[in-house]
Image (cartoon, helix red, strand yellow):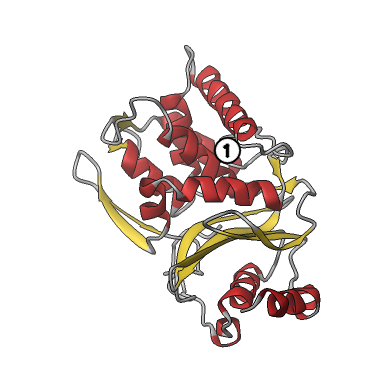
Amino acid sequence: MSASALKAKTTTALSEEITAQGAFLADGAEGKPLWSKAADTPRSQASTTKIMTAVVVLETPGLDLDRQVSVKQEYRDHVTENNASTADLKTGDTLTVRQLLHALLLPSGCDAAIALADTFGTGDTIDARTKSFITAMNAKAASLGMTKTTYDSFDGLSPDDKTTPRDLATLARHAMADTTFGDIVEKQSTKQNAANGRTYTWFNTNQLLGSYPGAIGIKTGTSTPAGPCLVFAATREGRTVIGVVLNDPNRFITAATLLDSVFQSDTAITMKLRQLPPGAQTD
């Protein structure tokens, strides 16, 4: 689509079709803005927070993705106390950091989020370690120029986890440059075996995967203050586009519509969303 054609589409049809409270679409290679709506208005971001959780872990100096982490009862308690999304990690099981990243990013496990924050934070207690991890999340946001982003939790459960569509797109583009992150978020499902032999099966809450041809990620998020959110990416004919929609009841259709505006397609009209199996986490 020519620049003039895209401009015509974005200033007319898109402005009427996009139901998100905030949105941003960017070229994946250069980060050039392609379309936006309230791009710099801070909003609650729900579990899209976990993108930063993964980034902080993945950029830890000397990271060993095969490092073993034991699941503590406190991780399950965190989920129960907050009625949060879960990977259903079992107390006493041992999983690798790589496996916990799957548990974090596919079923949006808040138990995996606290496990990673506890493992990679510093301090003498779980509370101290997780707080230091959140400090690292904010420091990373600052280093990326995410000037309107604040993290108050490691999993998005705090209403004070705020970001803008533009900032979140910046983070998403940065995260997708990491091959481990990209390999995980494009999976529709995974089976992972804990050290004791227990098999975990996790399904990706991002229903754009398997529904929109070329979709390669990234992360869902839903909470009462944030509404339904989606950070997404797709590649067609060698071009990658990254987008964000915040507080949008039609987030998957909106994402497809925005992608269509760049890829010159009408997938959003005919797309049938991949259904999650009974009992799978939604987010």
Q: Residue at x 70, y 38 (%)?
A: 149
x, y (%) of residue 282? 53, 60
In this rendering, position of residue 108 left or right of residue 221: left
Q: Nearer the viewer, residue 109 or 58?
A: 58
Q: Which residue is mark 1?
A: 81
Other-residue count near label 1 (Cα within 10 Å), few / some / many at <14 / 14–19 / ≥20: few
Q: How many marks?
A: 1
206 w.r.t. 41: above or below = below
Q: Residue furthest top?
A: 124
- Which quarter of the figure has residue 1? bottom right
226 w.r.t. 124: above or below = below
Q: For the residue labelled by badge 1, is the local secondary structure a helix, a strand or a loop?
A: helix
x, y (%) of residue 151? 65, 34
102 w.r.t. 21: above or below = above
x, y (%) of residue 219? 53, 55
Q: Residue at x 59, y 72 (%)?
A: 259
x, y (%) of residue 15? 79, 73
